[in-house]
Image (cartoon, helix red, strand yellow):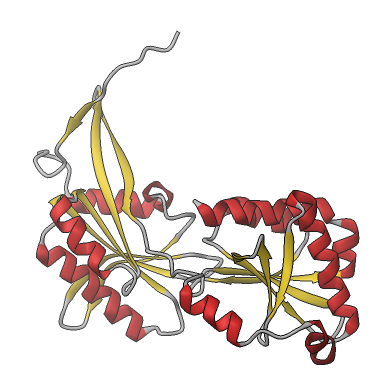
Amino acid sequence: MSKLFKPEQISIRDHPEITERIIQAKIAEDPSIIGLGDLILKDMERMQPRAGRLDLLFQDPETYRRYEVEIQLGKTDESHVIRTIEYWEIERKRYPQYDHCAVIIAEDITSRFLNVISLFNGFIPLVAIQMKAFKFGDDIGLVFTKVLDEMPLGFVDEDEEREVQQTSTNRDFWIKRASNETVLLADKFLEIINETEECYQFIYTKSNVRISQNGQLVPFIRLRIRKRNHFVLVLLTTKSENIDSLIENNDLDDMGYNVKLSRYRIRISNEDLLTKRDVLKELFLMAKKQYSE
């Protein structure tokens, strides 16, 4: 029978053998331990013009998003926060073709600095990760916990609802702009998601087709109807391994995840609506759950 016990927490900063360089190398060896996904290492100790060295630079192999990571043993301080943002800004300007995110890793992210860091969130894509070390006999285990995530952009607010009202149109508008064929495809999709709760309706706007439930705008989904053969299903939610797997395993036509706008884009054909009804329902429910978390 397994024995439960409380591990001994130790200070990395005060440990005589563990250095920041050792921690840096461990994260570089296995970036997944910091909880930001299956990243690849682009560089270590990356020289910054007139600004020192960036500890670690990672990149997401699918979205190509880059993460500028700074590590600090002990408590966060002003210089650590400023340096992290400065390196993020340098890399963002140097390589504007990529999306960038600043990452602070520290042993102790105090409530004071958590409050300061949170002021930047929403303006600067910033993630704070707290690093703890525990002793197990002669071994030391590292635990990384995300204590501040990027603040997702609000998808629905009074301005957006006002915009929907100001640009509202009707079904005939989309039949003329796209085609009757693709509007009927959208109708089939509405039938599918109504099998989950049977209370969804279309709201037609001049830019896309929205969905409402009991008179309330559903924030995480919209349809972009094309002229022929398909429409684009847009799901506004954070990137999820579960959603990625569902799309890939069922051979849906993925148009790529937009990191900056936090949205999936999937091309839906008539064949998808005929043969993948259960998959589309599951995708809808999964995106709904993911958005609400």
What percent of the width, then of the height, locates residue 74? 13, 48
The image quadrant that residue 45 belongs to is bottom left
List the single residue furthest toward the top.
Answer: 1
Q: What is the count of numbered marks? A: 0
Residue 240 or 48: which is nearer the viewer? 240
Q: Quadrant of the N terminus?
A: top left
Q: Position of residue 192 (x, y in %)?
A: 81, 57
Res. 235 in view? no
Reply above or below: 133 against 97: above
- The furthest residue to the front: 215
Nearer to me, 286 or 29: 286
Q: Position of residue 17 (x, y in %)?
A: 14, 40
Look at the picture and state if 212 lies above or below 293: below
257 vs 128, left or right, is right
Is 260 placed left or right of 190 in the picture? left
The residue positioned 76% from the left and 57% from the top of the image is: 193
Does 175 sit above or below residue 220? below
Instruction: Evaluate whether residue 184 shows in this view.
Output: yes
